[in-house]
Image: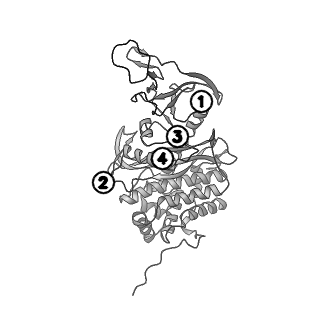
Amino acid sequence: MENITQISQELIENSVQMLPIGTNKNLLELLQNMMSGQFLESRGALFPALAASGQDQAGCQRISNTLRSGVFWIQEIIDAFVRQVKQSGKYESIEHAGYRALVADLTFIKRSGLVDAKGKYYHGGAGKAVGGVGCGLICEVGQVKGSPDRRMVLVREIVTETGLASAGQQIMQSELLTQVAKRLEDNEILIHDAGAKISQLQSHCLPRYLVRVPKTSVFRRNELPAAKSGKGRPSEYGTRIRVTERKYKDKIFKAHKPDQCQTFTKAGRAITVKLWQAVVLPSQKVSQDNPLLNVFVFEDPDFEKPLVIATNVNPLGAETVFDFYLDRWPVEHPPLVAKQLRGMQRQFVFNRVARERLLALSLIAGNMLTWLARLSEAQPTGFWNKKPQQTPGRLRRRLAQLNFSKLTPNNPRILKKSLAPTI
């Protein structure tokens, strides 16, 4: 256990050491507190969580002041963390057909009582949009070397509400796609769930994307249909394509015939794939300038509903497209670790800057905890845990037994800010 304590201490120190003196120590102590799960006990309250880790009143206040008015950028901490992971030699990116997956998603913390909330986000439990603090995650997908089939994400950027006059589901989605367009490298493809529409991706000029679309989606051919007669106005749109069968009342609308149909085996299951090539959105008229799409419909025997994927990357095989979409799911893990495993699903912080920073830092701490769990030996919860896994939850329980406030930073640059001398 001493080894993982030393590794975690070194990881956090190297992630904050470049920040201004004083600020780096305060953020070091805050991240240690988050990773040990003190916010789980305090239900999201900042001061009780800090006090539980051994901070006195002055310590709680200086960490709170750093959150509210400290001069630092979240991206500095992310870049330092990612640099350590890649320089460790224990991380490798996952590639398919020469491309890597760049995944993006929105997350938020429900704060329906905030009178100065910048916007509303859809909450599945409430069934409607509620006030809250949101941000966007941009991550790459990889794994620890020697651990196949154990995908994890590495956070590359967190898009916060900072600097925006207003926010909310649509505004943050647009801001997230804008940042993705800047971050996307030549060998990367954006993988997105159904939260983003194809028209949004095209309007943000994303060169490569793969996105899940509703099973009721309709597309068009990018060529004019044959004229039925010499009368009437010439058609401007291509033939409509329905990729899945639909039912309205007692009437059934059958899917159109695909361009290709094939089958591949995945985890012992025979998955049938239907493919429509070089199609466009239903609102687009026939034009050579239209961005073309390939639409895949996957019928998995383990699921009742088909999976419909659209991509502008050509050519990509059906199995490659399926693998890319599976790479999308690990982006859900940092919010899961931050909220459910470490108690950050609530916030009792009311300063606007502080609550945005606290959400971003909790996601970074969650990503750190996952990385450390993959590096360390599996930590059993108790004697009953015969086959423990390398999960952040088990590691968090072990870190909760440590008193981080008694640990002295190894980096000489991390120290308390000196008080100005009195005259």
Q: Secondary structure at mark 2?
A: loop
Give coordinates of residue 80: x percent, y percent: 56, 60
Foreground: disc 2 or disc 4: 4
Residue 181 bears which disc, if any? 4
Q: Camera-side residue: 419 or 155?
A: 155
Which amino acid does the dot numbered 2 rest on? Answer: Asp
Which amino acid does the dot numbered 3 rest on? Answer: Arg
Q: Secondary structure at mark 3?
A: loop
Figure colour scheme: one colour
Q: Camera-side residue: 413 or 163?
A: 163
Residue at mark 3: 208
Which amino acid does the dot numbered 4 rest on? Answer: Ala
Q: Residue at the location (50% across, 41% down)?
A: 207
Q: CA distance from mark 4 to mark 1?
A: 25 Å
Residue at mark 1: 318
Give coordinates of residue 87: x percent, y percent: 64, 57
Q: CA distance from mark 1 to mark 3?
A: 16 Å
Q: Quadrant of the N terminus?
A: bottom right
Give coordinates of residue 181: x percent, y percent: 48, 47
Query: Going from the N terminus, do you reach mark 3 or mark 2 first?
Result: 2
Is the C-beta separation of discs 1 and 3 under 8 Å? no
Residue at mark 2: 116
